[in-house]
């Protein structure tokens, strides 16, 4: 998922207000921007929505890497429309965060300075066209696991953004699987690329859910506030259960010999990813961390004159309008 | 007397000129995806690229049909080499900074929109149909690019300087849009496509108006590059095709 | 650090003649550009035929503590809702 290891903020508010606030959430009420909320709720949400937004924006890059090399006009159009949707999702989420009193520019600065994170998954490279399939199928598939329940999250603007995002997201995973089918049922070279993509993206996709948080106080607080709807392990299990049969249909092998149906738990057994790799990626040592942030930094710096130029023109116009009246 | 075979050959050329120009410009614009100065612009630019790719499918699809050799739009886009491309030189210019990209877009849109309007009156109903559909999309492209050129030309000192530099650099590539050759003449005579020089008055007026509002000055030089429409390109196109066509070339027996 | 583009609230009327509906927000240097951005951002899937843009800063919102007095009286006026009225079956669909 796109918000990993979001630590909840301790809250030093009036206990009576806290009880009343929790009662509203327990009753299924939505919290709106002007409502009273604990400081910890506000800060945790800014961190979570911000990280989610950053993931959408940085997430444009690995797929953007293949737009100029898409193999047909239709594939080019579909991929471009998908990456455009991700920009849109980032935009909706930044707007949701802005209702909490932080500006998009502030969030952008926090991303670029490394103060805020984005999902670990986007620090892996996309090396072949099959990766466009794997990203749609696995990465979007994992993201959807988390985004669908978030439509019911307690913070109104976040929930509404997720509704819009989920509506648009439905085509993303399908287009990814469609590419996988073409590749897996194509020439031997295409099939090999498909297997290679699955091999590289399997464990990073499992890492997207974050380490087990069944004993985490942060997660418990976020779940009580309904800004986190399921534990990481629940979502990961659900993802594996959904994905294994899909891989079988493609005739591809999950790169984990431990994957086996477990009748007792009614789900698949599987191996944990290498969490030391995950923590390195989070720290900035993934294969593409530096490139991703450099690309965002360059877009931001190179665009400054454009943003300023338009702002200057708009104020000239406003002044001229006032003078004319 | 032009024979049907000659006319079809000219028509194939004419359609490739349109389709290759939208293909190459759509590709250039898509290079910005994820890297634009602000999210709203990123999204807007992708819409323009998507429109152009869609128009490419229509123009090159019709070109393939007219050619009658069993090729399709994808084969024309991904399996021809540089010398077979018929796009305008203007659209293969590299993106440069964002201002350069927008100026290129405006100079092209200011031609594209009236050209499509003229093509709506084509004696070939297939062409008229595509032109009508594309025309609706391009009217918005022009509205947007003209507006941004005005705003940035008359923005800050820096944005003005960047837009003027872009204009100076791109200006010599504009003449080709309005310069006809024997292919254009044959198509115009048959009532199938508008003669390029018939677009000149509209283009001149529109560009003068927008540049005036933008406080930008068109260069005095009248020198114009040409050759793109006849397959003589700059070095830039080959690199673009090497990227764009790579998968199709590397795995010729694959379907995608 | 330069000044950020202001935030706008976007309202769109869809194909079916319903009221303009709030769909979200975006940043733009002025109203004209906000309309263009709204078209590109919020009508990508053919969602609308008319767009309103309003500077977010100019919106006056009811304060949450007014929630009771503002909305509860309307709650009591059940006769505003069609289900309040029993129409005999013989009358047919109404």
Image: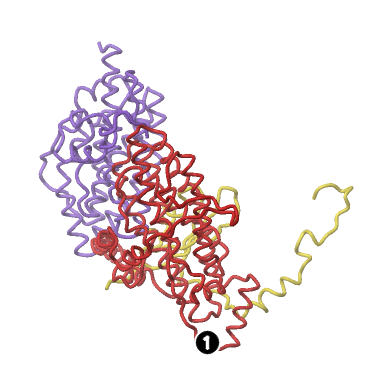
Chain colours: A red, B purple, C yellow
Q: How many C-alpha atoms fall within 10 Å of the one at disc 1: few (<14), some, or many (≥20)?
A: few
Q: Is residue A26 left or right of residue A238?
A: right
Residue A253 is situated, as x and y percent measured from the top left of the image, at 42, 44
**Position of B20 relative to A134 (above/below):** above
Q: Secondary structure at mark 1?
A: loop
C58 in relation to A286, above or below? below
User: Where residue B107 appears, x then y in whole percent?
Assistant: 24, 44
Decide: is C16 above or below B183: below
**Frontmost residue, C37 versus B112:** C37
Residue B243 in the figure: left or right of residue A124: left
Q: Nearer the viewer, residue A252 or B171?
A: A252
Residue B69 falls in image quadrant: top left
What's the residue at 76%, 69% (across, down)?
C77
Q: Residue beneath label 1, please?
A: A13
Q: Is residue A4 left or right of residue B113?
A: right
Across and down, in percent, residue B235 comes to 14, 39
Q: Determine if residue A157 is in view.
A: yes
Q: Residue at x 22, y 61 (%)?
A: B159
Residue B176 location (% of width, % of height): 19, 35
């Amino acid at each position: 998922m796109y918000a990993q290891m979001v630590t909840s903020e301790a809250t030093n508010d009036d206990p009576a207000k806290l009880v009343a606030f929790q009662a509203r959430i327990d009753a299924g009420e939505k919290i709106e921007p002007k409502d009273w909320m604990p400081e910890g709720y506000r800060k945790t949400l800014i961190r979570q929505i911000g990280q989610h937004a950053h993931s959408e924006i940085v997430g444009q890059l690995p797929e953007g890497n293949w737009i100029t090399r898409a193999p047909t006009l239709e594939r080019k159009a579909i991929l471009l429309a998908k990456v455009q949707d991700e920009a849109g999702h980032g935009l909706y989420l930044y707007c949701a965060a802005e209702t909490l009193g932080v500006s998009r520019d502030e969030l952008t600065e926090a991303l670029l300075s490394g103060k805020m994170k984005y999902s670990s998954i986007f620090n892996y490279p996309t090396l072949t066209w099959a990766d466009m399939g794997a990203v749609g199928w696995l990465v979007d598939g994992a993201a959807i696991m988390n985004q669908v329940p978030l439509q019911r999250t307690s913070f109104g603007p976040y929930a509404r953004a997720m509704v819009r995002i989920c509506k648009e997201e439905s085509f993303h995973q399908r287009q990814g699987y469609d590419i996988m089918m073409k590749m897996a049922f194509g020439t031997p070279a295409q099939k090999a690329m498909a297997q290679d993509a699955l091999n590289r993206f399997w464990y990073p996709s499992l890492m997207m859910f974050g380490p087990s948080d069944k004993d985490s106080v942060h997660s418990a607080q976020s779940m009580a506030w309904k800004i986190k709807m399921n534990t990481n392990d629940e979502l990961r299990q659900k993802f594996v259960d959904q994905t294994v049969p899909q891989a079988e249909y493609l005739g591809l092998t999950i790169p984990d010999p431990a994957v086996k149906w477990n009748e007792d738990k009614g789900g698949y057994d599987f191996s944990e990813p290498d969490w030391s790799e995950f923590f390195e990626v989070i720290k900035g040592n993934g294969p593409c961390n530096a490139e991703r942030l450099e690309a965002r930094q360059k877009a931001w710096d190179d665009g400054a004159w454009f943003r300023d130029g338009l702002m200057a023109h708009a104020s000239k116009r406003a002044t001229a309008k006032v003078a004319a009246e | 007397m032009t024979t049907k075979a000659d006319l079809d050959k000219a028509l194939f050329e004419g359609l490739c000129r349109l389709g290759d120009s939208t293909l190459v410009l759509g590709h250039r614009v898509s290079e910005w995806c994820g890297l634009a100065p602000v999210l709203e612009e990123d999204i807007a630019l992708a819409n323009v690229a998507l429109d152009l790719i869609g128009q490419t499918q229509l123009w090159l699809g019709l070109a393939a049909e007219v050619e009658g050799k069993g090729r399709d739009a994808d084969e024309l886009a991904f399996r021809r080499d540089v010398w077979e491309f018929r796009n305008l030189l203007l659209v293969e210019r590299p993106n440069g900074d964002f201002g350069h990209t927008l100026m290129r877009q405006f100079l092209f849109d200011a031609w594209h929109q009236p050209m499509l309007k003229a093509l709506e009156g084509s004696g070939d109903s297939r062409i008229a149909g595509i032109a009508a559909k594309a025309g609706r999309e391009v009217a918005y492209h022009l509205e947007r690019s003209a507006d941004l050129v005005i705003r940035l030309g008359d923005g800050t000192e820096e944005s003005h300087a960047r837009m003027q530099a872009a204009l100076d650099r791109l200006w010599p590539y504009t003449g080709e849009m309005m310069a006809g050759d024997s292919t254009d003449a044959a198509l115009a005579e048959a009532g199938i496509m508008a003669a390029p020089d018939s677009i000149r008055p509209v283009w001149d007026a529109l560009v003068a108006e927008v540049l005036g509002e933008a406080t930008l000055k068109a260069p005095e030089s009248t020198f114009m590059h040409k050759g793109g429409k006849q397959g003589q390109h700059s070095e830039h196109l080959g690199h673009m095709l090497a990227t764009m066509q790579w998968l199709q070339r590397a795995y010729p027996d694959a379907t995608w | 650090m330069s000044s950020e583009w202001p935030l706008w609230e976007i309202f769109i009327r869809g194909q079916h003649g319903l009221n303009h509906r709030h769909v979200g927000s975006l940043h733009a240097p002025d109203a004209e550009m906000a309309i263009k951005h709204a078209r590109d951002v919020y009508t990508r899937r053919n969602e609308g035929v008319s767009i309103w843009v309003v500077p977010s800063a100019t919106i006056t919102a009811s304060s949450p503590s007014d929630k009771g007095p503002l909305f509860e009286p309307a709650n009591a006026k059940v006769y505003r809702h069609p289900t309040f009225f029993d129409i005999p079956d013989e009358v047919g669909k109404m």
